């Protein structure tokens, strides 16, 4: 699963970079996305696969809460092998995850906390695929 931070601190241009990376990823594998801010938008659930890249848009614009994402992923661990959170990294650290968790950080930002040992962190750059 991929959770896309749509809080007010994530700009539309940052979301465009994130969605471009997702389009590239969809060429290689199938995955499910959810939008979030202080809650996960279950209605935004979308499956991406090669040849089927959905329209990308904003459905949220509040604060940021990673705890809601971790709770949602843990409740859905039977559906997913792991999950990636696309974010600017600017919210308090959530509890540990029961499944593999990754952080894909938008350009020019970083996590404001230390990721768990079992987590992985990747930084994006403008105009390029994820680093």
Image: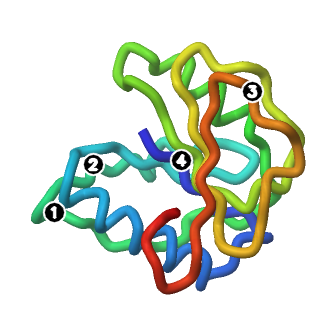
| Residue found 20% across the figure and 53% down from its top | 28
- Proximity of marks 1 and 2: CB atoms separated by less than 8 Å: yes
- Proximity of marks 3 and 4: CB atoms separated by less than 8 Å: no
User: In the structure shown, which secondary structural element does the residue marked by tag 3 occupy?
Assistant: loop
Spatial CA distance of label 2 from label 3 is: 28 Å
Which label's residue is closer to the chain start, 2 or 3? 2
The picture quadrant where one finds residue 27 is bottom left
Q: Which residue is mark 4?
A: 3
Q: Which residue is mark 2?
A: 47
Q: Is residue 19 above or below residue 100?
A: below
Spatial CA distance of label 3 from label 4 is: 18 Å
Mark 2 Cα-neighbour bin, 10 Å: few <14, some 14–19, many ≥20: some
User: In the structure shown, which secondary structural element does the residue marked by tag 4 occupy?
Assistant: strand
Residue 94 shows in the view: yes
Query: Which of the two residues, 104 or 12, is positioned nearer the viewer here?
Result: 104
Residue 52: mark in rendering: 1
Residue 16: mark in rendering: none
Q: Which residue is mark 3?
A: 116
Q: Is residue 6 left or right of residue 81?
A: right
Q: Position of residue 102 (x, y in %)?
A: 57, 39
């Amino acid at each position: 699963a991929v959770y896309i931070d749509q809080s007010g601190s994530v700009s539309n241009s940052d979301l465009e970079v994130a969605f471009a990376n997702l389009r590239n990823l969809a060429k290689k594998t199938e995955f499910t996305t959810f939008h979030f801010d202080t809650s996960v938008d279950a209605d935004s659930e979308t499956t991406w696969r090669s040849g089927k890249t959905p329209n990308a848009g904003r459905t949220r614009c509040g604060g940021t809460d990673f705890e809601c994402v971790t709770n949602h992923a843990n409740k859905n661990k039977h559906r997913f092998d792991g999950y990636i959170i696309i974010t600017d990294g600017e919210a308090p650290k959530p509890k540990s995850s029961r499944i593999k968790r990754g952080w894909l950080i938008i350009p020019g930002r970083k996590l404001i906390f230390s990721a768990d040992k079992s987590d992985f962190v990747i930084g994006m750059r403008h105009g390029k695929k994820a680093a």
